[in-house]
Amino acid sequence: MIRFQRVSKIYPDGTKAVHNLNFTIEKGEFFVLIGPSGSGKTTTLKMINRLIDLSEGTIFIQGKKASDYDIHELRWNIGYVLQQIALFPHMTIAENIAIVPELKKWKQEKIKKRIDELLEMVGLDPATYRDRKPHELSGGQQQRIGVIRALAANPDIILMDEPFSALDPISREKLQDDILTLQRQINKTIVFVTHDMHEALKLGDRICVMQHAEVVQIDAPEQLIQHPVNAFVKNFVRSGNGHYEHECIEDLLAWMKPAAAEAKTVSSHTTIQEALALLADEDAVAVEKDGEIVGTMTRQVLVKYLASRIGERQFQ
């Protein structure tokens, strides 16, 4: 879907914003870019829709060079969600959502139907919110509008640049849950920038860790936790593998999905370390306690639990 081939961005003063990027983002993948400030993650994101021009190499989008697309066509077909929500204050919510569909000359009836469909998708009643102005919405509601505005013209790719970082923790957690639910419905290719490892572990199918303008490791969340490639990744993830290697999955019962007897069965005394290894090959395992199946453990459940522990700074 999106392929970086020897991509670098070098500014006139010689500063390397990104250096020699080589990776592919798959269709339908939730791909997270993370790293400390100045690591190059936002530059990498903005080169996809040509908000920043690359200096060397090539970015391919659906097999075609990004530079070969008409710039307006490219950006209309890539949704973009910012930290600064940037809704037009003088426009209604409906008018904000309709911007790209109108530029693409959709018929008004189609636009109206799309607006209502998107509002319902994020739990906002169209009749209540369609004609409101942005200042009449909470920060979390405005950010939901920012997300669905990016989806309005049904693009294949969504770029999200720290979209939840300005929100309070409760709103942020809710929107993270919402975007995961939404992604299961829409199955878009999402490229998401964050500096929050808790958020990255919770959301990403794969996480790209960057440092000093280069990619350090690209892996699934559980692999980053279990197999960091160096001390920087280990410290950045703050996994502290030794801190949970003796903990049992019994501690995760409240996080588990309903029991599924058809899955491979493990004891509730199985350690988290052992569960990570099992789930590298299994989609799910049934958890047995006192002779009964009490729940189903999946990679997603386990990673979400570990991410919450990291978020609480319990891995030190």
Image (cartoon, grey):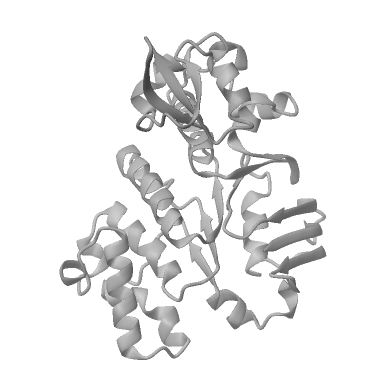
Q: Residue at x 58, y 32 (%)?
A: 282
Q: Nearer the viewer, residue 59 or 18?
A: 59
Residue 255 in picture, x, y percent from top left: 37, 28
* Quarter of the image that includes the N terminus: bottom right
User: Can you say whether 199 is above or below 99 in the image?
Assistant: above
Q: Which quadrant of the structure image shows residue 147? A: bottom left
Side of 233 relative to 164 (left or right):
right
Q: Extreme left residue here? A: 128
Side of 137 relative to 250 (left or right):
left
* Quarter of the image that includes the C terminus: top right
Residue 28 in picture, x, y percent from top left: 57, 58
Residue 232 in picture, x, y percent from top left: 70, 28
Q: Residue at x 62, y 58 (%)?
A: 45
Residue 217 in picture, x, y percent from top left: 72, 38
Q: Residue 220: in sight, yes or no?
A: yes
Q: Residue at x 45, y 53 (%)?
A: 163
Q: Residue at x 59, y 17 (%)?
A: 274
Q: Residue 16: in sight, yes or no?
A: no
Q: Nearer the viewer, residue 127 or 268?
A: 268
Q: Which quadrant of the structure image shows residue 292? A: top left
Side of 115 relative to 306 (left or right):
left
